[in-house]
Image: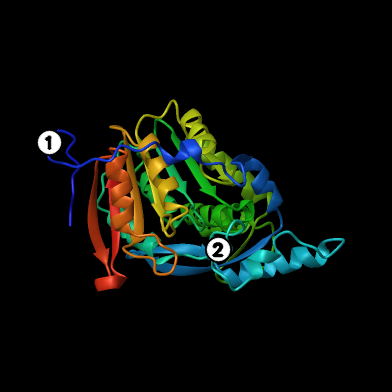
Amino acid sequence: MSFKFDFDQEDQEIVQVDNPLNSYNEIIKPKIHLFDEILKSLINIRISYENVVLGGISMRRRTIYDVRGQIMSEDDMSDNGNNSTNFLLSEDDLIKGIYEGGLKSWECASDLIEYLESFNIDNNNAIIEMGCGNAMPSIRIIERLINNQLNNNGLKIILSDYNYDVLRLVTIPNMILMLMKKIDNETFIKLQEDEVIRDEEIVITESLIKWVKEYLYNNKISIDLISGGWGNEYVEIIENSTIEYKNRLVLCSEGIYSNDTLPIVAGIVSKLTNGQTDTFIAAKDVYFGVGGSIAVFETWLQNLQVEYSVKKVGGNGSLSRSIVHCK
């Protein structure tokens, strides 16, 4: 099903609403983190990964068991045994106000990867992923731009997740794993600095970090990371960080899962989306028990006068999934 919002249609009933961001206060204020600082925090960390197929594309992803192993190791090394990342060891996918499920790869992220394979990204020079977690959709877009040498004029990447530790433990390691596919085996061995390496494993050495930084610099790729909540401050950070980048691509998977987050995502979309910004929201049609749905999201977009279309991409009946394209 596809729907295009027509602002001139006289019989279209529109309920004018104030942007929900104007009355929303983030529990945790958004905070910018330097890519270099996160890289430094990973020195000498051994990363185990798996090769997965998402949206028909083979990708590398750090294993959840490896992440939990690092968390427990850091807990053992802490003086008081009270590690602030212990909540990440919980079996709960969501802990309201604390954790938004960023360690897992969700079904709709795979939908987004597959859907965007046919989308022309030649002119996009800024990639923004909200609630990125593993950041597989963004990483795939970046890989395509690098492979096709389409980032000659510079590429700005903004990856945001509610939890800083998700950015540190999975987002950046997954980015590094993708970049490691760009080097030959001889170079890889040198970058490992004589570490003993098993299959599907890398060590984040100082040499490897130096190579990553040089590669990104030489390819004019800049990476910003944001933790914390979404609201007007978050939008201001995005706008200020991409002021020189006119063709933006905004991505979000599963972000409209609840009645709490859905209006906020709609508000952000209405502020970020314009004629030179494409926004893609991948979601289940209905999130049972938590209130989010594509239908409610559409209502918000209509009332905020955002032009959009909807494409069914998977599942059947109440388990259907869709992608909303706003422009």
Which residue is pictured at 46% across the width and 48% down the height?
130
Query: Which residue shows up at 80% across the image and 67% down it?
Result: 76
- Picture layout, residue 9 above or below residue 55: above
Residue 156 location in percent, x, y? 46, 36
Residue 23 circle label: none
Task: Tell me the crowding category of disc 2: few under 14, some 14 to 19, or many 20 or more residues within 10 angstroms, Cα based.
Answer: many
> Extreme top residue here?
244
Q: Quadrant of the N terminus?
A: bottom left
User: Label 1 is placed on what type of residue?
Assistant: Glu
Nearest to the eye among marks 1 and 2: give it. Answer: 1
Q: From the image, tell me which residue sits under label 2.
A: 103
Write down the quadrant of residue 96 in the picture.
Answer: bottom right
Q: How many neighbours does mark 1 have within 10 angstroms: few (below 14), some (14-19), or many (20 or more)?
A: few
Q: Which residue is mark 1?
A: 10
Query: Is residue 174 visible in this depiction of the protein?
Result: yes
Above or below residue 288? Residue 212 is: above
Q: Is residue 32 left or right of residue 327?
A: right
Tell me whether the residue at label 1 lies in contact with that at label 2, contact meaning CB atoms closer than 8 angstroms: no
- Disc 1 on helix, strand or loop? loop
Q: Amino acid at mark 2?
A: Leu
Residue at x 26%, y 48% (from the top left corner): 119
Residue 198, visible in the rendered structure: no
Residue drawn at 46 percent across, 68 percent down: 51
The image quadrant where one finds the C terminus is top left
| Residue 161 placement (x, y as % from top left) | 54, 51
Residue 165 x, y percent position in the rendering? 64, 55
Under circle 2, the secondary element is loop
